[in-house]
Image (spheres, rainbow, N blue to C red):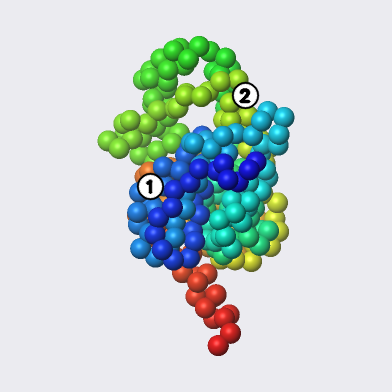
Amino acid sequence: MDPARIAYERHGRGRPLVLLHGLGDRRQSWTDVMHRLVDAYDVISVDLPGFGSTPAPMLDEPYDVYSMTEDVRGFCELHGLERPHLAGNSLGGSIALELAAGGAAGSVTVFSPAGFSDRAARLGMRTVGHLANAAARLPTHLKEQLADTPPARAAARVALRGDPSSPEAKATRFGVQGLEPGAPYVRMVPRIAEYTFVQRPVACPVTIAWGDRDRTLLPSSAVHAHARVPNARMVSLLGSGHIPMADDPVAVAEHIRWTCRSADRGHARRRPR
């Protein structure tokens, strides 16, 4: 897609840092983290194609992890972001790692990236895809009513939050706005279920973090991630679920900062004197 159509928010000064959200999310999921990084970095959070304010590709156009990777690459080129730091959650984490493997990142910090699940987890994602496809065919008012039922709200808290019983998790619910046949979420779920991050060299500093209460992409996936990205610094986020930016934005920001600093120190050593 045209990278000029990608919506974004930009704050701070310093070396560029691009934040990439997860499937079905939007750039505002990074707000609490962004505020903790703008003192040292030029922070850019984007809406990935099909989410937030960025339109989706047409139904006959490619739409998967690889096409989104090229979209983000084009966005960075358009805005003059040469090998920026990257941070991503879930789908956004996969895109960040793909860009890093292609030499387009200064550093990468990812949280529960997709592409490392075992066979059982992939079956679960396919099941979610079938359910989303079925739900997309229901009338909007009925989808809204179902999403607001106590069982659906409880399932959303368990799936998305580290501590489902916390006051902060009380408002969590599955979003149904835009859940129609051919909607971006419905199109992307089966692509995520089939996607695997293929092992290859990733030269820049990498941190891979997993919430120990992630019930969407299980923490056991971190074992596969370490095997395929052996140079990565592996981190367990205690008490966090699949979206750690909501559960612990302070820890998320600090891990991003650590990885960025590691890369910046290496960059400074390599500069000619």
The amino acid pointed to by label 1 is: Thr
Mark 2 crowdedness (10 Å alpha carbons): few <14, some 14-19, many ≥20: some
N-terminal-most mark, 2 or 1: 1
Residues at discs 2 and 1 in contact (Cβ within 8 Å):
no
Camera sees residue 214: no
Name the foreground residue: 123 vs 113: 113
At x 48%, y 15%, the residue is 140
Provide the residue designation for mark 2: 182
Could you tell me residue 99's position as x and y percent? 63, 55
Provide the residue designation for mark 1: 31
Quadrant of the image occupied by residue 77: bottom right
Q: Quadrant of the N terminus?
A: top right
The amino acid pointed to by label 2 is: Gly
At x 55%, y 75%, the residue is 267
Name the foreground residue: 192 vs 141: 141
Could you tell me residue 52's position as x and y percent? 48, 36
At x 57%, y 60%, the residue is 80
Q: Secondary structure at mark 1?
A: helix
